[in-house]
Image (tube, helix red, strand yellow):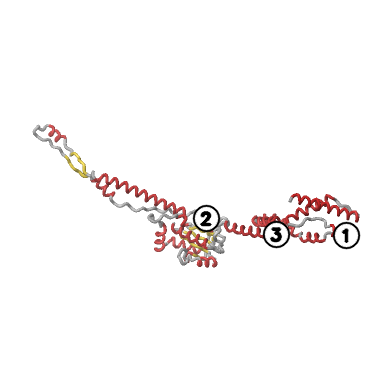
Amino acid sequence: MLSTAFSLAIVGYVVTLAMGRTLAAKHGYDVDPNQEMLALGCSNFLGSFFKIHVICCALSVTLAVDSAGGSSQSVLGALIAVNLKNTLLQLSDPFYLWKKSKLECCVWVVSFLATFFLSLPYGVAVGVGFSILVVIFQTQFRNGSEVGQIMDTDIYKNPKVYSKVQSLSGVKIVCYCSPLYFANADIFRQKVIKKTGLDPGKLLLARKKFLKKQTRELKLQENAENVERRRTVGSLLFMKPQTTSQLQLQQDFHLDEQTTPTSYVNFHCDDTDQTDQRASSQPPSPITMETHPVPFHTLVLDLAGVSFIDLMGIKVLTKMKKSYEMLGISFYLANVQAQVYEELEAGGVFEDGSITRGHLFLSVHDAILSSQHRAAAPSASDQMHRAKTELAFDMEEEEKDLEQELF
């Protein structure tokens, strides 16, 4: 291939230069060999990226045009150059796009290079594919934010952007501005954990391990008490000499030989041992664990920026609600769009009761007022539900991977 290309380059250059000198001598002008070599080299080099034929002089056509009196310039080349003027000016677009949006600049550069080196159809396909990857990248790494209440208003904004924003005691509000689907569902959960500062999965696993440890220690203590009880059952009675006065001892010492000495023996049952035995026979108290206070009692998710949600996103929401409610934290959704509500309803979350309609609010302020009212005066049903779900661990059930079940 290299030898063939080199031969074509030499032959094409010689033929073109010879024809140029012939016509130059006929019409009285000069031909620069270096200029001809540069023109042929640049034309063939740039044209090789677009799969064109080798540029060379056509002997018969050139002589025919000269015999007919033709002396015009390359009109076709001039037309193409004029039409490409605006296109060539677009080569400065990457500098403008880099200042405005670096991702848009990357899309432009990738599409241009793919078209330049691979031809137009492949370049268009590469550009479309890279644009789709950019969209997925933007939806995955869109940052959520924790919002607070602007003083003396019912508006909730990001405190890093707005001033006079105060956080509410016992309430966490997280705003997420991106569709919730399979590509970013787990990232959404991680964002909520990061903004709230509480990982329910790890906390529930820690509580479960603590209960297992306490149960194991209690069983070991019961076994040790049973062994000790067996050892002390046969030794409840023991001999204890009666204390005698010094006068009685002297009398016993001066007894006659015919008199039989008297020994005093008292069989006595120790009351303290009976008390210990009675106390140890009582059944041990059940394992109790004071729940560590969580930093907040209500979590509100502002879904105003969520345009759609798929089944994976619905699954993540239901599992998050379940895990937070096991810790005694209320879980609310606010500003749910109509399309998102229809998708939640189609996903069956209202039918199976994983998320009830009572957990959805038209605005964040409505959810805050409801949470404050319930926290100030919890109803009997709320207390019963919280008591059931706060520490829902049965140590005799089958061992399950709680972290896999929750998330």
Circle on res. 120 = 3
Whole-number angstrom distance, CA of label 3 to CA of label 1? 37 Å
The reply, left or right, for residue 295 in relation to residue 158 is left
Number of residues whose C-alpha sits closer than 10 Å to that of mark 3, classed few (under 14), some (14–19) or many (20 or more)? some
x, y (%) of residue 345?
Answer: 50, 67
Q: Residue at x 84, y 57 (%)?
A: 59
Residue lying at the far left of the rendered structure: 258
Q: Residue 135 at x, y = what percent?
A: 61, 59
Q: Amino acid at mark 2?
A: Gln
257, 215: nearer the viewer: 215
Tag 3's secondary structure?
helix
Q: In percent of the image, x 64 and y 56: which residue is there?
A: 103
Which numbered disc covers residue 368?
A: none
Query: For the residue labelled by badge 2, is the local secondary structure a helix, a strand or a loop?
Result: helix
Q: Which residue, given by chain and number where applicable, does mark 1 sit on?
A: 66
Q: CA distance from mark 2 to mark 1?
A: 77 Å
Q: Amino acid at mark 1?
A: Asp
For disc 2, the marked residue is 190
Mark whose residue sits in front, 2 or 1 = 1
